[in-house]
Amino acid sequence: MMDLSMLTTAPGARKTRKRVGRGPASGSGKTSGRGHKGQRARSGYSQRPGFEGGQMPLNRRVPKRGFYHETRRPFTIINLDEIETSFQAGAEVSLNALAERGLARPRSGGLKILGRGEITIAITAMVQAISAGARAKIEAAGGKVEMLGVETLGGEE
């Protein structure tokens, strides 16, 4: 008969912890694996990430390029072939409509439509930017394009 007292862990599943400072015969006696003196041998030692012992750290040695603007939100870009497969005729294509279908984030900097692919359905595109080729294809299919300003996105954060 088997009961809970007979259960054991698999071999190698539990590793015994290293016991330091238990005499020279243990292999981890005296300095307990910390070497001789120095900052790292002391109790309470901690080091911030990226510290290189006083040497100029890598993130400060590497040249910095470009410009980062915290509130910059780039356009969400979508092509006509993606619109063709995601919307029906007469639909209104906007940033919110794309976000509902999981094709865009609602808080991006706006919507830009590019002209890759063909479109055969008439849609109303409410965008902040559009390429000339995409505008021509939408209007040729019987749709229309409404240009919106970036300020219509709900203001700044």
Image (cartoon, rainbow, N blue to C red):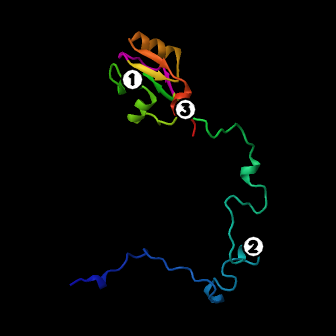
Dot 2 or dot 1: first in sequence order is: 2
Residue 146 in the figure: left or right of residue 69: left
Q: For mark 2, what is the residue?
A: 39
Mark 2 or 1: in front is 1
Q: Residue at x 47, y 36 (%)?
A: 106
Q: Amino acid at mark 1?
A: Glu
Label 1 to label 3: alpha-carbon separation = 19 Å
Q: Nearer the viewer, residue 118 or 137?
A: 137
Disc 1 is placed on an element classified as: strand
Query: Outermost residue toward the left?
Result: 1
Q: For mark 3, what is the residue?
A: 109
Residue neighbourhood size for the residue with mark 1, other residues' Cα within 10 Å, grouped as few (<14), some (14–19), many (≥20): some
Label 2 to label 3: alpha-carbon separation = 49 Å
Q: Nearer the viewer, residue 17 or 89?
A: 89
Mark 2 or 3: in front is 3
Q: Quadrant of the C terminus?
A: top right
Q: Nearer the viewer, residue 136 or 1?
A: 136
Dot 1 or dot 3: first in sequence order is: 1
Q: Residue at x 48, y 15 (%)?
A: 135
Label 2 to label 1: alpha-carbon separation = 65 Å
Residue 104 lies in magenta, yes or no? no
Q: Which residues are magenta?
A: 111-122
Across and down, in percent, residue 7 comes to: 31, 80
Residue 156 in the image: above or below residue 88: below
Across and down, in percent, residue 123 comes to: 38, 18
Q: Amino acid at mark 3?
A: Gly
Q: Which mark is residue 14?
A: none
Q: Residue at x 43, y 32 (%)?
A: 96
Q: Residue at x 37, y 22 (%)?
A: 84
